[in-house]
Image (spheres, rainbow, N blue to C red):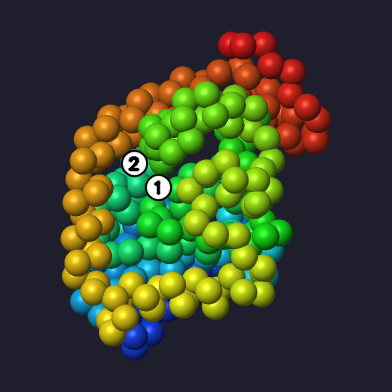
Amino acid sequence: MNPNEFKDIIYEIEANGILTITLNKPQIKNALSPLTLLELWYAVDHAAMDEEVKVMILTGCEEAAAFSSGGYFSQDMLKNIPEKYRKEIDLMDMASKRLCLKFWDFEKPVITAINGLAVGGGFTLPLVCSDLIYISEDAWIALYFVKRAVMMDFATSYLLPLIVGFQRAKELFYFGERIPAQKAYELGLGINKVLPKDNLMSYTRKQAQRLIPPKGPSLAISLMKKTIHAHFRDIIVKQLDLENKGWKKTLRSIDFKRSIEALKKKKETEFIGK
């Protein structure tokens, strides 16, 4: 799949080597459909092979007022995907192992600019794929997996405890509360800086320029990233497999079905633990 075929994301590369990937599904607040995830995989693949790309910026389109509302699944979610690409989508890979490892092995710096709500996979994606995360002061994040009675994804079963500690990570997963940008920064949730919304992208671009020539030694930086990531790769793979096993169980649960029914009725879910 070539960048000119992308429907859910915008792929823009500049002469200075900055690649900006923009989630572009404002009607569903940049939710991550199977097509979106597939396009992101191809975007990283192209960026890895393109010597002109020195650094990647990931953000959401302004019209959505969101970075990403997380996973999006519907009965017709595969309908608009060309047949030749449909076979690449593994609906059993709910933890997004394929995309997660693609980002993990990507040796060029990735900066995410969270410019609105970041829910579920809308936050776990940047947590695993980003070298730096900047967030607008009016944005918020939430790990709503528990509200749907499902498993976490993107290897955050390992990464979040590593970042914030076991008890804090469990609290975030178990309760799924909404967290404002400043509090997310104070909790140490991988946020490097909170910025006024109007300054978010300009600051992100300024930092990106510091990572590439003439201001930054891009070769050394990519080697630093590769070396840091190498130590964690095996455990990342293991946790992704465990997360996928958890997804298979939770998607078959009565609690998951009840949560979907409650969501449609805009009511609180009454769980039964089965």
**As drawn, is 216 to the left or to the right of 220?**
right
The disc placed on residue 93 is none
Residue 261 in sight in this render: yes
Q: In this view, does 106 lie above or below 10?
A: above
Residue 200: % across, % down: 59, 70
The disc placed on residue 128 is 1
Between label 1 and label 2, give the one nearer the viewer: 1
- Which residue is drawn at the image coordinates 54% and 29% (left, top)? 168
Residue 260 falls in which quadrant of the image? top right
Residue 61 in sight in this render: no
Residue 109: % across, % down: 33, 64
Q: What element carries label 1?
A: helix
Answer few, some or many: residues within 10 Å of disc 1's Cα (few below 14, many 20 plus, some between 14 and 19).
many
Answer few, some or many: residues within 10 Å of disc 2's Cα (few below 14, many 20 plus, some between 14 and 19).
many
Residue 179 falls in which quadrant of the image? top right
Q: Distance of mark 1 from mark 2, alpha carbons? A: 11 Å
Q: Do the residues labelled 1 and 2 touch (CB within 8 Å)?
A: no
Q: What amino acid is found at the position of numbered circle 2 in the picture?
A: Lys
Q: What amino acid is found at the position of numbered circle 1 in the picture?
A: Val
Which quadrant does the N terminus fall into?
bottom left
- Which residue is drawn at the image coordinates 58% and 32% (left, top)? 172
Q: Nearer the viewer, residue 93 or 60?
A: 60
Residue 146: % across, % down: 60, 28
Q: For mark 2, what is the residue?
A: 97
- Which residue is drawn at the image coordinates 34% and 88% (left, top)? 15
**As drawn, is 228 to the left or to the right of 119?**
left
